[in-house]
Amino acid sequence: MGDTFKSHKIEHMLQEEVRILIVDDDPDILEFVGYNLRNVGYTVSIIKDRTRIIEQVAEFQPHLILLDIMMPEIDGVTVCTKIRRNKNFNETLIAFLTARHEEYSELAGLNAGADDYILKPVKPRILVSRVKALLRRHRHLGDESLHCINLGNLILDREKFMAMVDGNEISLPVKEFEILWLLASKPGKVYSRDSIYHNVWGSNVIVGNRTIDVHMSKIRSKLNQPLIETVKGVGYRLQA
């Protein structure tokens, strides 16, 4: 009964149905990306017949397309260009998910109209974080996604000041919640103590580094997981 209640609670906190279309010729990538995006509540479809991409985009009406550049039948830049020329897909977000690390490939993708360029291999938390950041730009999804962060086993709801880890709600005072929200908003980014201070307390309140360290210690204790990393001499980051 308890597990069922937690499951419903998590489902309630996730965003409304978001459709994501994956276009890639690598079965392992399709399985990896599809699993991790479905796992956080997205509706995912995979294109198998890449000669009919435009037709399948029209049928599925995705909010976001994750597109590889190197495909045998047609290259991703050409696909992106075709989609961007179709006014019916003006609000569709496009991100390249590719192993092409060359600068000219990234420039070609962005110039074709892509909204982001994500390099393979990518860790699951980074992938989900980048997808969530992209979806905030969507006109019909932005307001909803601004108050919810879902990073694997960590869920934050800013409207309710609610935090959950592994399906269990943890109690965080406002400042502790705001610190965790700041770190979770950009996993992997290092925030200095000064940056945390200005973002959470503002410029009109004076607190010392020790205050921030104490808050961080309490957050770590409640998370009971090594999610927050200390970068010596710099600050803190949420591990991606």
Image (tube, helix red, strand yellow):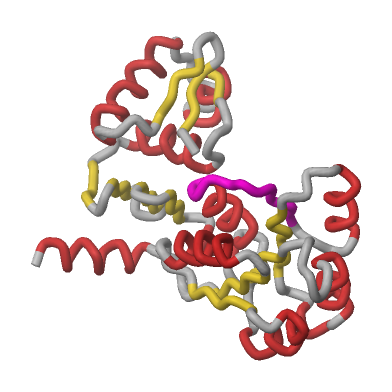
Task: Specify whether residue 69 is painted magenta.
Answer: no
Residue 121 colored in magenta in the image: yes
Position of 214 relative to 24 (above/below): above
Residue 165 image offset from top left, x and y in percent: 28, 46
Answer yes or no: is residue 61 visible: yes
Q: Nearest the camera: 102 or 65?
A: 102
Q: Locate residue 196 relative to residue 70 in the image: left or right.
A: left
- Left or right for 38, reference 123: left
Q: Which quadrant holds residue 192?
A: top right
Q: Is residue 203 visible?
A: no
Which residue lies most toward the left here? 1
Provide residue 160's location: percent of width, then percent of height.
Answer: 34, 54
Name above or below for residue 220 compared with residue 155: above
Q: Is residue 183 left or right of residue 65?
A: left
In this picture, is 180 found above or below 61? above
Q: Residue at x 50, y 50 (%)?
A: 124
Looking at the rendered structure, the number of numbered marks drawn on it comes to: 0
Q: Residue at x 74, y 52 (%)?
A: 117
- Image location (x, y in percent) of residue 188: 54, 34
Q: Range of the magenta residues? A: 116-125
Residue 181 image point, x, y percent = 45, 40
Q: What residue appears at the point 44 percent right and 10 percent down from the top-left corner?
A: 208
Quarter of the picture holding the N terminus: bottom left
The residue at 82%/70% (across/down) is 80
